[in-house]
Amino acid sequence: MKRIDYRGSWVLVTGASSGIGVAFARTLAHRGANLVLTARSTDRLERLAADLTRSNGMETRVVKADLSAPDGVRTLLDGVDALGVSIEHVVNNAGFGSTGPFHTTQPEKESAMVRVNCEAVVAIARHFLPELVRRRSGGVINVASASAYQPTPFMATYGATKAFVLSFSLALSEELRGSGVRMLAVCPGPVPTRFQETAGLRLGRLLRFSRLEAAEVVEAALDAYDRNAPVVTPGTLPSLSARAAGVLPRSIVLRAARWVFEHRGDPALAQNK
Ligand SMILES: NC(=O)c1ccc[n+]([C@@H]2O[C@H](COP(=O)([O-])OP(=O)(O)OC[C@H]3O[C@@H](n4cnc5c(N)ncnc54)[C@H](OP(=O)(O)O)[C@@H]3O)[C@@H](O)[C@H]2O)c1
């Protein structure tokens, strides 16, 4: 398998201020890519950019954008266009979740989640793909989740947004077959990052058992991207449960998803019963 040579190419990484986004940035910088890093936390992005440039000698740019704001995606795309660099790969990684019975969630947070996890992914892909297709190179990596494979009771909106990302990415990977442009959906299981705190989720005993580190997820993602695979589900347990969700009756899959959530070993969840 021939690995992609990122040296000198520009990669846009969203959600680059934390967790899996930082791991993407570090690995890609190590492989020689120049990076446009975006998120809301410019201080974190600036520190990361300086560190990556110092350690790897590549170039970095930072664009601040809140993808949940009505003009957030426009701010990002205008900001990237104004840099005058030619983006060859996009990592749509920004995203967040929430936990709890849906009728008790914060309405604005649920809607913002759809904007960040779905709308931004569509708009960003639509913006960069015409040029990639014209050049017959590069591609897009969309970070979905193992939650994409089945509905997720008590994380209903989050699971639905990630099912959207998986379906959208798979459809585009087929449209783009033979075009020279790659499209990959990454479906990680639990990864200890700020995600859990933002979602109000604790990694209970059950989920701790199947967790991967962010750097491991990124290695698996970039290996799959090298192979031009349409989807990758890093880790043995998430990949087995994804397969099971594809063959078992939906009623059993739903009950199992609920059972896993309720038996994560997270005492906070007892309140939901
Ligand atoms: N951790 C897991 O267990 C897990 C599992 C499966 C999939 N994922 C997915 O992996 C991706 C990365 O998550 P993570 O685990 O690395 O979580 P994280 O540490 O919380 O990072 C999330 C990133 O998204 C950015 N972001 C969130 N809201 C944003 C907004 N409104 N506008 C712009 N950027 C925003 C954050 O930056 P700012 O806060 O600075 O804006 C941050 O850089 C997400 O799509 C998540 O759904 C995570």
Image (cartoon, rainbow, N blue to C red):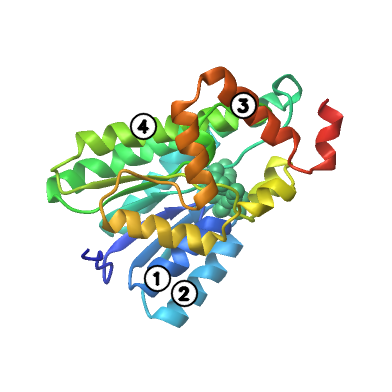
Q: Which amino acid does label 3 sit on?
A: Ala
Q: Is mark 4 on a helix, strand or loop?
A: helix
Residue 241 image point, x, y percent = 52, 39
- Work out whether mark 1 precedes mark 2 in sequence or the reverse, and give the earlier one: 1
Residue that carries the numbered disc 3 in the rendered image: 156
In this rendering, which labeled residue sits more in front, label 2 or label 3? 3
Q: Work out which quarter of the rendered image holds the N terminus and state it.
A: bottom left
Mark number displayed over residue 108: none
Residue 132 image point, x, y percent = 20, 48
Q: How crowded is mark 3: few (under 14 residues within 10 Å), some or many (20 or more)?
A: some
In this rendering, which labeled residue sits more in front, label 1 or label 4? 4
- Work out whether mark 4 precedes mark 3 in sequence or the reverse, and give the earlier one: 3
- Work out whether mark 4 precedes mark 2 in sequence or the reverse, and give the earlier one: 2
Residue 35 image point, x, y percent = 38, 64
Residue that carries the numbered disc 2 in the rendered image: 52
Q: Is residue 18 left or right of residue 87?
A: right
Q: Work out which quarter of the rendered image holds the C terminus and state it.
A: top right
Residue that carries the numbered disc 4 in the rendered image: 168
